[in-house]
Image: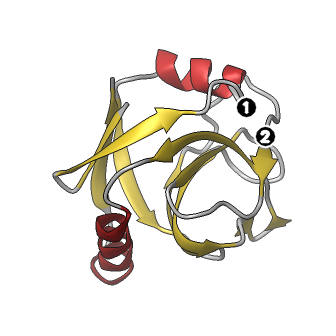
Amino acid sequence: MRIIVADHPFDAEFETEKSPASCAAFQRAMPFVSQIVHVRWSGEGVWIPLGDMDFAVGYEDATAYPTPGQILLYPKGKSETEILIAYGSVHFASKAGTLAGNHFATISSDLDTLVEIGVATLWEGAKAIRFEN
């Protein structure tokens, strides 16, 4: 998979063995175009708030502590549906408390640039994002 954030391309791999339903649901939604904003409570990450969007998946390979480059899908529950991308230290949370999201993909290139984009998102605001095959 290719992810383009603020005109910068990243390579990423789906975690199909660990999160097969989440990967399949997200692949059906591709190309997926949105904006990232900096997380509110979770630390060094960016997220895509998706409100009531329903990927119709349960929990699989869920974590509250993703490592840099890991991408999580939170499939509705005590908070809204969202996608989180860790660029540094993250404890995934919302106003409702700790969340665990499905680790469905991992960015495999340019993690230093991901950090730069994450910090720029904090200080400058939303950035465009596109997920494509």
The extreme bottom residue here reads 123
Question: Residue at the location (66% across, 60% down)?
Answer: 66
Q: From the top left corner, tell me how far across and down residue 62 is, in percent.
A: 79, 46
Q: Is residue 64 left or right of residue 7?
A: right
Q: Residues within 10 Å of mark 2 (few under 14, many from 20)?
A: some
Question: Residue at the location (21% across, 57% down)?
Answer: 6
Q: From the top left corner, tell me how far across and down residue 120 is, in percent.
A: 29, 77
Q: Earlier in the sequence, mark 2 or mark 1?
A: 1
Answer whether labels 2 and 1 touch (C-beta < 8 Å). Answer: yes
Work out whether residue 46 or residue 77 is closer to the camera in this orientation and state it.
46
Which quarter of the figure is the N terminus placed in? top left
Dot 2 amino acid type = Asp
Q: Indicate the secondary structure of the residue bearing disc 2.
A: loop
Q: Indicate the secondary structure of the residue bearing disc 1.
A: loop
Work out whether residue 116 or residue 110 is closer to the camera in this orientation and state it.
110
Q: Which labelled disc corresponds to residue 61? A: 2
Work out whether residue 115 or residue 101 is closer to the camera in this orientation and state it.
115
The extreme left residue here reads 7
Q: Which labelled disc corresponds to residue 18? A: 1
Q: From the top left corner, tell me how far across and down residue 108 is, in percent.
A: 42, 48
Question: Residue at the location (42% across, 64% down)?
Answer: 37
> Up-down: is 127 above or below 35?
below
Q: From the top left corner, tell me how far across and down residue 118 is, in percent.
A: 38, 71
CA separation, marks 2 and 1? 6 Å
> Up-down: is 39 above or below 9?
below
Q: Is residue 79 left or right of residue 16?
A: right
> Up-down: is 125 above or below 4?
below
